[in-house]
Amino acid sequence: MHHTRSSGRYAKALLDLSIEMGKIDRVKTDMEQLLATLRASRELRLVMQSPVLRPDRKEAIFKALFESTFDPLSMQFLSLLAKNRREMGADQIATDYIDGWRVHKGISKVVVTSAQPLESAQRDMLLQKAGSFTTGQIELEERVDSELLGGFVLRAGDRQIDMSISARLEKLRNEFDDNLYIREI
């Protein structure tokens, strides 16, 4: 993203204003919808990145897409992004806003990647494990990656627990590479 530093500032400003106005959850829903729309539409992303389109045209596109469902605060914010030529960073701003919302609500996001979809007993065990090093409520995101071969990778904030078969095989491969013992025949 081009505007990572400024996108954090825009997201924080929107978060602070939405808290002040009592609209934090409503704006969060809008930012989730904005993010989903931008991720789903390659054409919209290309339009937002176009330096040829004037800001008022991009503002009109935002209005046409979101005015009927978004809170007026969210719409004013999107207009501000277009006027300040920051619409290219809208997806990063929305992501930063949602992250800030989680922090404000005391919610820790935990991502579990496994080779197979989790069963409820496994999910409960992983939530308990995540609860040992996170505080507050836990929001669990599950991902499936068959390249793990088995096991799981648990990520919460800056902590990661990698109990995957592929990681164990890689560790074993590195141990064999580092072993200087050569058996004579």
Image: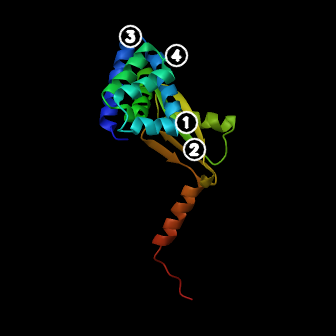
Q: Earlier in the sequence, mark 2 or mark 4?
A: 4
Disc 1 residue type? Ala
Residue 6: image location, x then y, percent = 30, 33
Q: Which residue is mark 4?
A: 68
Q: Earlier in the sequence, mark 1 or mark 3?
A: 3
Query: What whole-number distance in Å separates the C-alpha atoms at marks 2 and 4?
Result: 37 Å
Q: Which of the two marks, 1 or 3, is nearer to us in this view?
A: 1
Q: Which of the two marks, 2 or 4, is nearer to us in this view?
A: 4
Q: Which residue is mark 1?
A: 40
Q: Residues within 10 Å of mark 1 (few under 14, many from 20)?
A: few
Q: Is residue 182 above or below residue 169?
A: below
Residue 8: image location, x then y, percent = 34, 31
Task: Label 1: state its secondary structure.
Answer: helix
Q: Which of the two marks, 3 or 4, is nearer to us in this view?
A: 4
Q: Which residue is mark 2?
A: 113
Q: Earlier in the sequence, mark 2 or mark 1?
A: 1
Query: What whole-number distance in Å separates the C-alpha atoms at marks 1 and 4?
Result: 19 Å
Q: Is residue 68 above or below residue 158?
A: above
Disc 4 residue type? Ser
